Structures are given as structure tokens and as C-alpha cells.
Image (tube, rainbow, N blue to C red):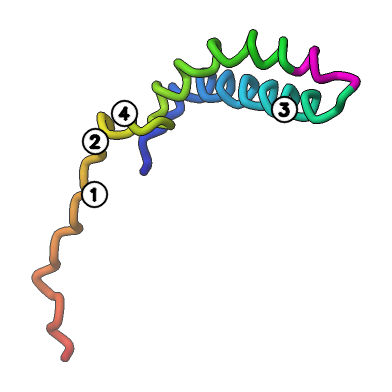
Amino acid sequence: MRTLTPADVTVFGSLCEGQATLERAAKLKGNPETVEAGTKLEKDFLPLVRPYYALFGLEPVSRARISVPKPAEAPVSKWAGALK
């Protein structure tokens, strides 16, 4: 959608790190020996990551608020089609 800019890199990186932590928590929950640690990690990180989802339009409500301007069409040259 071309909505990210260089100014978003740090915040988007934080979202990626938080998401990676949640994925690690899911793996921990899949192992009976580490299910409690995974559940705690998920419980701690989900509230931290959720606002980032909204910032980047990764949930239905926030996605509806993002508007992307249509790209400007290139001006047509006065010579377009002259060599037909």
C-alpha cells in the first residue's frame, strides 16, 4: 500500500520484535514442559504488541481508517502516438 516511510522503521521494527516474541511464546506453549512459560510470555507481550497492530492497520477496524492516495498519472506527452 506504500504507507510505510523511513520514519516508520524503528516503530515497525518494534512490532516485528514483539511479534517474534509472541511466536516464541506459541512454540513454548506447544511443549508440555514449557507451556506455563509460554503462556506467561504471551500474557505479558500481547498487550504490548496489540497497539502496534492498530498503528499499522493490521486489524480490521484500524485498516478501515487507512487511506492511500491514488498515484498520480504520468502526464501524456504531446508526442504520444506521433509515430503510428
Mark 4 or mark 3, earlier in chain: 3
Residue at the front extreme of this rendering: 32
Distance between mark 4 and mark 1 Cα atoms = 24 Å
Out of 75 and 17, give the one closest to the viewer.
17
Q: Which residue is mark 1?
A: 71
Q: Of tags 4 and 2, which is closer to the observer?
A: 4
Image quarter of residue 66: top left
The answer to whether marks 4 and 2 mark residues whose Cβ atoms lie closer than 8 Å is no
Distance between mark 4 and mark 3 Cα atoms = 25 Å
Q: Secondary structure at mark 4?
A: helix
Question: Magenta stretch?
Answer: 33-38
Counting labels gives: 4
Residue 26, percent across and down?
72, 27
- Badge 4 crowding class, 10 Å Cα cut-off, few under 14, some 14 to 19, many 20 or more, is few
Rendered view: 82 above or below 12: below
Q: Which residue is mark 2?
A: 67
Q: Which residue is mark 3?
A: 26
For badge 4, the amino acid type reads Val
Rendered view: 3 above or below 12: below
Image quarter of residue 55: top left
